[in-house]
Amino acid sequence: MDAFVTSTIKNGIGTITFFHPQGNSMPSAQLAKLTAEIEKLGNDTTVKVIVLKSEGDRAFCAGASFDELTAITDIETGKAFFSGFANVINAMRKTPKFVIARIQGKAVGGGVGIAAAADYTFATNAAEVKLSELTIGIGPFVISPAVERKTGTTAFMEMSLNATDFYPAQWAQQKGLFAEVFDSVAEMDNAVDTLATKLAGYNPDAMQLLKQVAWENASHWDILLQERAEMSGKLVLSDFTIKALEAFKAK
């Protein structure tokens, strides 16, 4: 299948689904579409709650598109690419609707950031997480505010420094990244539907105010995440990163 981002609305629940044939990785076009869908459902008065999910059963999101990373040749292009993840995270933060994330498989790099930016995150036992950015000479700068907000600095640094290691879903739950972890996709989907249905019946004004309270210390992220995107945009042009990406593609 070709890459896509789609959304549906049913009984007050807006569901966004994304897919990319390379492990649900995220090129710029995909990030822009995802941001637009989040903003669209956030502004739709018929939508009371948003569910974010990906297709497939092995990977939730493999993070940045390596094909696009290797094509970056200047700082502005690099900053623009990493700003795509900043825009998704900020859209999730700023939408007046609660965002429920459904994590059915592995999440790497930016995929961990998306999981962290959700207001409530369900996962299966297969939902291992990894921050691999340091292995290619950059860092998880754009996603760090969202991940640290959920897990704390200690867990964030543990993942960041052990950049070749996947951490199990149970670890992610213990650190606060995942709210609930299930043995099967069916059990997880039942829990997602149950919570989404409940939220769709609650007072939208109360939920909007509760979301504002939950995110009240993140009002500076519009600027902060763009600054972080510039950090990565510069580092992706370093000799270390260029060689690391070439080695990765040669595998």
Image (cartoon, rainbow, N blue to C red):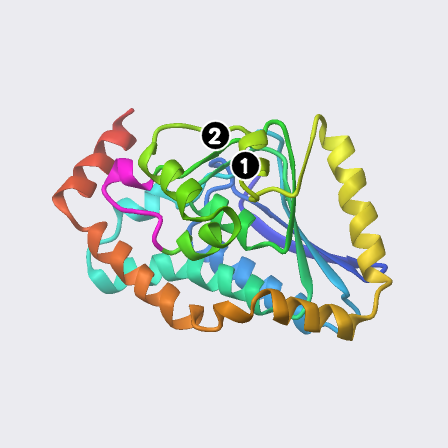
- Label 2, secondary structure: give it: loop
- What residue would you read off at disc 1? 172
Along the polypeptide, which appears first: circle 1 or circle 2? Answer: 2
- Magenta stretch contains residue 136: yes
- Which of the two residues, 116 or 41, is positioned nearer the viewer here? 116
Can the viewer see residue 40? Answer: no
Within 10 Å of disc 1 (Cα), the crowding (few <14, some 14-19, many 20+) is: many
Q: How many marks?
A: 2
Could you tell whether 218 is left or right of 239 in the image?
right
Q: Which residues are magenta?
A: 133-141
Which residue occupies 59% across, 37% down? 173
Residue 203: x and y in percent read: 83, 70
Q: CA distance from mark 1 to mark 2?
A: 7 Å
- Label 1, secondary structure: give it: helix
Residue 83: x and y in percent read: 38, 62
Can the viewer see residue 50? Answer: yes
Examine the rendered structure and indicate whether residue 167 appears above or below residue 230. above
The quadrant the N terminus occupies is: top right
Tell me which amino acid carries mark 2.
Tyr
Examine the rendered structure and indicate whether residue 20 appears above or below residue 209. above
- Magenta stretch contains residue 8: no
Q: Pointers 1 and 2 in contact (CB under 8 A)? A: yes
Which residue occupies 22% across, 35% down? 244
- Which of the two residues, 125 or 157, is positioned nearer the viewer here? 157
- What residue would you read off at disc 2? 167
The part of the image, by quadrant, that contains residue 54 is top right
Within 10 Å of disc 2 (Cα), the crowding (few <14, some 14-19, many 20+) is: some
